[in-house]
Image: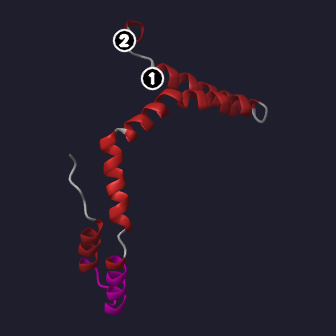
Amino acid sequence: MAKKINPKTTIKKLLDKTEVDEKLLDKIKEVLEKTDIDNKILDAYVDAKESGLLDKIKCYIKCYGGYVLAVGAGCLFGVNFWWGLGFLTAAGIWGYKINCNHKLCKR
């Protein structure tokens, strides 16, 4: 499991290293003490990573990203031929890279 970083202590260390007006420093510390949003975000990220949700999202992007590029290429052909051709080429490269697990690709 990855080491959990506490943003409050990290920000506090950075603030201690810099020369800032003391009133401003006190206000920033007060705001940091009142909020716990950063901890909630980190906890939600850790929970999503442990449940496999992030891996599932990455898989869908990897699998279907080429289709999105191909649809974008079809739409762009009506606007500008060269942009459409670029997106179509990117979709082809995307598909080749994702499916390059058999012997024909390794030659």
Secondary structure character of the magenta stretch overall: helix
Q: Indicate the quadrant where residue 38 lies.
A: bottom left
Colouring used for the render: secondary structure
- Residue in view at x 35 percent, y 38 percent: 52
Q: Residue 11 location, x and y as percent?
A: 29, 72
- Residue in view at x 33 percent, y 44 percent: 49
- Residue in view at x 68 percent, y 34 percent: 83
| Residue annotated with mark 1 | 98
Q: Indicate the quadrant where residue 33 lies.
A: bottom left
Q: Residue 61 location, x and y as percent?
A: 49, 34
- Residue in view at x 73 percent, y 32 percent: 75
Q: Amino acid at mark 2?
A: Lys
Of residues 86 and 40, the one nearer the viewer is 40
Of residues 64 and 56, the one nearer the viewer is 56
The residue furthest right is 78
| Residue annotated with mark 2 | 106
Over which residues does the magenta segment extend? Answer: 17-32
Q: Is residue 57 above or below residue 106?
A: below
The residue furthest bottom is 23
Q: Is residue 27 above or below residue 47?
A: below
